[in-house]
Structures are given as structure tokens and as C-alpha cells.
Amino acid sequence: MKETALTPEHIRLGARMGEFAGYNMPIYYTGINDEHLAVRNAVGIFDVSHMGEFIVRGPHALELIQWVTSNDVSRLAPGKAQYSCLPNAGGGIVDDLLVYCLGEQEYMLVVNASNIQKDWDWITSHNKQGAEMTDISDTITLLAVQGPRAAVTLQKLTDVKLDKVPYYSFVRGALAGVKDVIISATGYTGAGGFELYFDRQHALKVWEAVLEAGYPLGIRPAGLGARDTLRLEMGYCLYGNDIDETTSPLEAGLGWITKFTKDFIGKEVLLKQKQAGLTKKLIGFEMQDKAIPRPGYAVFDPAGNRIGKVTSGTMSPVLKKPIGLGYVAVDFARPDTEIHIQIRNNYQPARVVQLPFLKTTAPANA
């Protein structure tokens, strides 16, 4: 398995390690629920350095990224970031990603760890314009410092005025004595906070500085287990579970990142799907008892007809009830619709709910 620069430190701290996307990653330290609640109520730090980063620059950079992504990159000014996806020719999703505008004719694409090579191959295959591309994934450490006390924690380590950094914006500055850190007001927890991109040689220095700064505020190192339950409470999609090459952004509720005002791969297919009307949609649901839904479980209507499948599920640490995401026939996608989840040989009742499951004061996804 591959390692991040912090893998030895996670092991030293006693993390329960496991394979994820070919990396040896911390799944949890003290426990998923404990880490989840620390992020919701205080602050947590995640090592997410397994994610991939590509630099795209030059006079044709914007043209290339506009063609391969669904969102409108031309709206990005330097210092702004954007959530988007890479659609395929059939209207499915190659990956979801973040696009950062680093400056004039220079962008950074942040992609999922499991898709680094696939995404690189996909984008380079469409680089007919000759944009300059560099894969910097192995040189970058990425830390996500998330939670309502994240800004107070990080402010101890930088002169950058973090309260002046709007959501989905970023600045470059010194942090913990390390120069040229990208400090980005982004994250995938719904708890607020920042993501830090910097050279991997400084990984341990920054990690330890953040933990020390956050110690009086209740910081916890957090693993991928809590990252998953946190994103699920917000109804955020996980690639490979809730979105993939066979699901369209429209079906996944990502029409807001699908801009038909520009040309992009798969546009005509998605436009026809939009005009014809969807046949299935991604929904959130709450179980009516304590049975926990799992990916792949079948979904039925009250009459016993199969109408879809579960893609993600967990016991919500905050709501203290089982929740899940799944695709169902569009007639059953309205909130308060009764559905049944097949769990082993039983059909457990559930109710479709409006996403996100958890209503927070943190900014909505943008």
C-alpha cells in the first residue's frame, strides 16, 4: 500500500489503519462517533493527502477545463474554488472534483484518490489544445481542519485573517512557519473549516502545530470513518457509492453544477435527459427503526415492487437514527414518501426526507 507523509505518525498515535484507494489510511483513532462529534461541536483534523492534485496552466488551460468539467470555470476569479464533475460521453460521472483558480491561466484540479490515474488519462486524452498539465499528487500534503472552532485553531498559526476568507475561496500565506500554504475555506463535512495544501516535507510540522493549537479547543485527529459519516449527514455524494460512470449529475441532484450555457463532454445527452424528465433520482431517507441500511440493499415500494437501491447508509451520530442515500424511481422521490429497505429477509420501513439530514449553520455546498 502507498503511504502519505503522515502514515508513520498515524500508526504512532494508535490509529486503526486500513486500505483505502491503495493507501494505508487511518480509519479511526478513538472511535468514529467520538471523532464525528468532535468535528460537529469543536474541531477535528484529517489527513486527506491521498487525494490527487493536477496543475493545468497556459493559454489553453481554461478551454480544456471548460470542456472536461460540467460547471462554468469562466466564472472563477483567482482565489476562488468550484465544485464540479467530469462527465463522460454518456452523461455519467468520471469523477467529482474541486477546481481552484490559482491565477491567470493557472488552475489546480483536486480529484478523488481512487481515480487519480483514471482522471489523468481522461483529461489528457481530451487535451487537444496543448494545455500544460502536471500531476503534483505525490508532492502535496492535504489536511482538512474542520469544525466550528477550526478558524480559531488555525488563526493561532497564521497572520492571514481567516474570517476574511469567504466560503469556497482561498489565500496563499504562511502557516505554522511554513510558507506558501494554500488555505482554502472548503471541506466535505458541513461543519465549516479549512483545507491546507502544502509541500509534503512539512507534513509533520504542520500536523503537530495544528494539534497543539487546537488542544485547548478539544481538537481530535479524525479518520476516514468519521469523514464518511459527516458527509453522509449532509447528503454529500461519495464517488463509487452514490455517483459513478452510470449515474448522471442530474439524477444525483447535481444539476446546480451542470451548466448548459457552455459546451462540455456529454452536454447533449444530459440536455436530452433533462428535457425528457428523469426516471430515477438520488434521495435521502430515514429508517423508522434501528435497522441500518447498507450499500446495495434493495428498495421497495409499500406494494412490494422493487424501485431502487441503497448507495450509502449509517447510524447518524448526531440524529441518533439510521440514515441513507439511494436511487429510486422518480415517482417515489418526494419527501415523506414511504419506502421499504430489504435488510436480509425483512422489509424495513423508511421515509424519504429533504436533504441535508442535518440542518447546520455551516455554509451549504457551493
Image (cartoon, grey):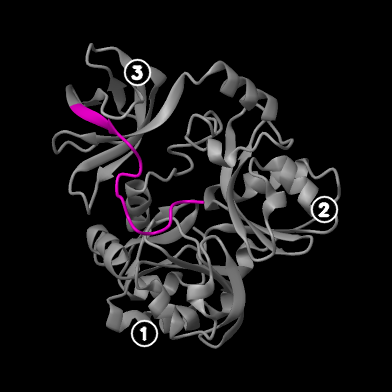
Amino acid, disc 1: Glu
Residue 349 locus on image (x, y percent): 18, 26
First in sequence: mark 3 vs mark 1: 1
Q: Is residue 123 above or below residue 217?
A: above
- Distance between mark 3 and mark 1 Cα atoms: 50 Å
Residue 123 part of the magenta-drawn span: no
Q: CB of mark 3 within 8 Å of CB of mark 2?
A: no
* Circle 3 crowding by C-alpha within 10 Å: few under 14, some 14–19, many from 20: some
The magenta span reads 349-366
- Distance between mark 2 and mark 1 Cα atoms: 42 Å
Q: In the image, 4: left or right of 53?
A: left
**Which residue is denoted by mark 3 in the rendering?**
307
Extreme residue in the bottom direction: 177
Nearer to us in this view, 96 or 361:
361
Q: In the image, 65: left or right of 242?
A: right
Q: CB of mark 2 within 8 Å of CB of mark 1?
A: no
**Which residue is denoted by mark 1 in the rendering?**
212
